[in-house]
Image (cartoon, helix red, strand yellow):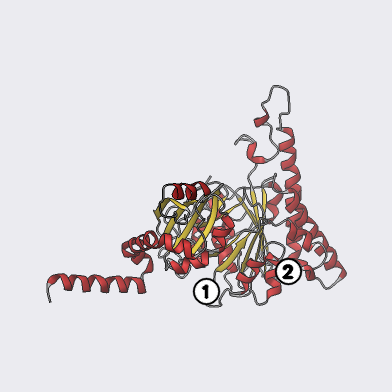
């Protein structure tokens, strides 16, 4: 056996081992080359088999008859660019006349099988230009977040999408969101990653954790306000409403509506104010909303009505004042009482982890996308952290949150405790804690930089 044969056997063995144990490494070393060649070689036949070709135009047919040449073949979308990524390939196509973006989106599953890739998704870049994002392996099996993420204000990288992109929780685009999921589905880890990402930004965190604070209390050094029971939560929400009214007074005073002020400088929210006048934004995190809506006695019913009223008021009016809501719960339906569906209608972002029944998935996506409901009920129990994310536009995608231990999140919050702003209305709810103790053997994960 010569050295060339031995080298090829060793190389093939290394490739098989990497594909089995380290799919990301295999993709970067071998897979991306094989996949690109496979796509380019099979492209025309695959497009024809998937019905993504168009007949030649009449003038080309007429020209072929006049010149006594063979009839032109059908034409597939033209490849504008093929670009490798750390998780797959990005193929940009120019559609032919008569083709539609919906036809390409409907054929993504057939394209996935034909090109022997793990996943294919399509999105329209502009008129007649489609981008196919192809993943070479299961990126959600072992989530690896990029070492460097975009550091935009109020935009937190919290998970990885199934197409290999980073999922950003952007509060400026989607101010309020709902997060549902069954026990052990990864809902708390998602919330933990969100707090860890917000900890490094110039933002005030207010938390309501009616499980006696077991989820949010360890992270309390980075919280401006924290409530661990419904009574305190009612007072905290009332204080937030008063704070919102004060912020609106600042905005109204600084709108500068006069004849000599350009239209672009007239403001109706905090983000158009000068930095030295801009109030600090507030993110309110509610860990279990059902505990705020349940009641037994008449007094508890009055407290519950006041809580839901304040939450609805914050959801309807809080965006311009820089107040954002993150509502979590196992179920979020009309059985929680009056006002709940009104609150849900204000929550644009929807995240659903594994649920125990289809009704719970319908509470998140029933009024948005039936396909997202089906994808939610198909989340397996052996993949905690996997979720379906959608919004009011009807679009949805699968994501998975990287596992962050409580100690990592605690260390990160303790290291950024000096960023915790003081707000007068929320001062009575500021957690009082002893001096922090950082663990030396656990390093906090890297997140987006502060504003």
Q: Nearer the viewer, residue 341 or 293?
A: 341
185 to 447, vertically: above or below: below
Is residue 301 at least partly visible in the picture?
yes
Question: Which label is found at residue 383?
Answer: 1
Q: CA distance from mark 1 to mark 2?
A: 25 Å
Question: Which label is found at residue 172?
Answer: none
x then y, percent, for residue 75: 47, 54
x then y, percent, for residue 407: 49, 66
Q: Residue at x 52, y 67 (%)?
A: 109
Image side of residue 428 versus residue 117, left or right: right
Regarding mark 2 in the picture, which secondary structure is present there? Answer: helix
Is residue 439 at least partly visible in the picture?
no
- Quadrant of residue 355 within the rendered picture: bottom right
Circle 1 Cα neighbour tier, 10 Å, few/some/many (<14 / 14–19 / ≥20) = some
Image side of residue 39 versus residue 341, left or right: left
Q: Residue at x 31, y 73 (%)?
A: 16
> Which residue is outermost to the top?
260
x then y, percent, for residue 308: 78, 60
x then y, percent, for residue 290: 73, 69
Q: Residue at x 33, y 61 (%)?
A: 33
Circle 2 Cα neighbour tier, 10 Å, few/some/many (<14 / 14–19 / ≥20) = many
60 to 120, vertically: above or below: above
Q: Earlier in the sequence, mark 1 or mark 2?
A: 2
Regarding mark 1 in the picture, which secondary structure is present there? Answer: loop
Image side of residue 104 versus residue 292, left or right: left
Q: Mark 1 or mark 2, which is nearer to you?
A: 1
Q: Nearer the viewer, residue 61 or 289?
A: 61
Q: Nearer the viewer, residue 145 or 12?
A: 12
> Which residue is outermost to the left?
2
Q: Residue at x 60, y 70 (%)?
A: 375
| Residue denoted by label 2 | 290
């Amino acid at each position: 056996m010569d050295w060339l044969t031995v080298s090829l056997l060793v190389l093939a063995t290394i490739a098989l081992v990497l594909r089995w144990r380290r799919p990301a490494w295999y993709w970067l070393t071998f897979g991306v080359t094989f996949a690109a060649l496979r796509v380019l070689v099979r492209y025309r036949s695959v497009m024809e088999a998937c019905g993504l070709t168009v007949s030649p135009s009449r003038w080309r047919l007429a020209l072929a008859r006049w010149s006594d040449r063979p009839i032109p073949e059908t034409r597939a979308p033209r490849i504008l660019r093929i670009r490798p990524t750390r998780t797959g390939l990005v193929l940009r196509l120019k559609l032919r006349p008569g083709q539609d973006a919906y036809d390409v989106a409907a054929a993504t599953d057939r394209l996935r099988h034909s090109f022997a890739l793990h996943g294919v998704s399509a999105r329209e870049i502009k008129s007649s230009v489609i981008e196919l994002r192809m993943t070479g392996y299961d990126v959600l099996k072992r989530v690896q977040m990029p070492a460097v993420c975009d550091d935009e204000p109020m935009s937190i990288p919290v998970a990885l999408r199934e197409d290999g992109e980073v999922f950003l929780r952007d509060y400026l685009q989607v101010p309020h969101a709902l997060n549902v999921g069954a026990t052990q589905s990864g809902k708390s880890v998602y919330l933990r990653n969100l707090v860890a990402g917000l900890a490094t930004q110039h933002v005030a965190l207010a938390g309501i954790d009616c499980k006696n604070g077991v989820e949010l209390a360890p992270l309390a050094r980075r919280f401006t306000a924290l409530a661990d029971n419904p009574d305190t939560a009612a007072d905290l929400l009332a204080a937030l409403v008063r704070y919102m009214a004060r912020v609106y007074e600042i905005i109204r005073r600084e709108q500068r509506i006069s004849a000599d002020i350009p239209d672009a400088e007239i403001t109706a929210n905090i983000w158009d104010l000068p930095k030295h006048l801009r109030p600090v934004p507030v993110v309110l995190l509610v860990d279990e909303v059902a505990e705020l809506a349940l009641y037994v006695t008449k007094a508890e019913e009055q407290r519950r009505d006041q809580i839901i009223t304040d939450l609805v008021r914050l959801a309807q009016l809080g965006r311009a004042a820089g107040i954002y809501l993150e509502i979590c719960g196992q179920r979020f339906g009309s059985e929680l009482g009056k006002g709940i569906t009104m609150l849900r209608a204000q929550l644009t972002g929807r995240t659903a982890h594994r649920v125990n029944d289809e009704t719970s998935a319908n509470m998140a996506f029933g009024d948005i996308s039936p396909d997202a409901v089906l994808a939610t009920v198909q989340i397996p129990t052996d993949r905690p952290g996997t979720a379906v994310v959608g919004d009011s536009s009807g679009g949805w995608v699968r994501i998975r949150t990287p596992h962050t231990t409580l100690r990592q999140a605690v260390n990160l919050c303790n290291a950024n405790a000096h960023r915790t702003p003081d707000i007068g209305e929320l001062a009575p709810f500021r957690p009082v804690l002893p001096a922090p103790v950082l663990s030396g053997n656990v390093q906090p994960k890297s997140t987006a930089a502060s504003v």
